[in-house]
Amino acid sequence: MKNLIKIIFLSLFSVIALSAQESKQNDVTVVISNLDSNNGKVFVALYNSKSTFLAKGIKSGIKKIENNSCTITFKDVPNGTYAVSMFHDENDNRKFDTIIFGIPKEDYGCSNNAKGFMGPPKWEDAKFQINNESIIQQIRL
């Protein structure tokens, strides 16, 4: 009987310990301000690796602009390392327009307000950590 009680107690303790170690799902709120106009929409993407940064986000969204700003929230984001990018599709053609040599024609930005030099921003400059807390990333153009 004592052994049965010990087994039950250890089983219950193991379940409690495992549930305490589960990663919390967090929110990432992106606040974009100082857009040139209220025309078009803003495309925003959340990335979780250097290899997919600026190529394929794990979550994305499109927001309307009001008062030259917008806010989007990505829900249920597990703990980890992330980066955000956005662009203002001012002419509403659903793509990021560039001019000669790939120079951007429309406004863009990244988390941590990372800027690129002679190219796009780097993952190392845009990345941020999430560890059991929801965060706000502010991108000011």
Image: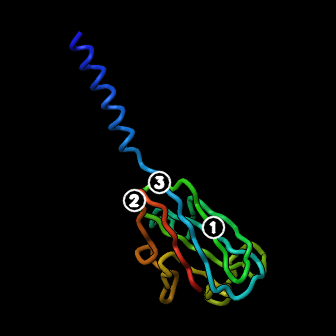
The relative height of residue 65 versus residue 55 in the rendered view (above or below) is below
Of callouts 1 and 3, which one flags the residue occurring earlier in the amino acid sequence? 1
Of callouts 3 and 2, which one flags the residue occurring earlier in the amino acid sequence? 3
* Local secondary structure at mark 2: loop
Name the residue: 68% across, 88% down.
99
**Residue marked by disc 2:** 131
- Whole-percent x, y for residue 131 in the image: 39, 59
**Residue marked by disc 1:** 72
- Does 129 sit left or right of 61 as displayed? left
Check if mark 2's residue and mark 1's residue have beta carbons within 8 Å: no
* Quadrant for the N terminus in the image: top left
* Quadrant for the C terminus in the image: bottom right
Name the residue: 61% across, 81% down.
108
> How far apart are the two marked residues, 1 and 3, measured between alpha carbons?
17 Å
**Residue marked by disc 3:** 78
For badge 1, the amino acid type reads Ile
* Local secondary structure at mark 3: loop
* Front one among 36 and 124: 36
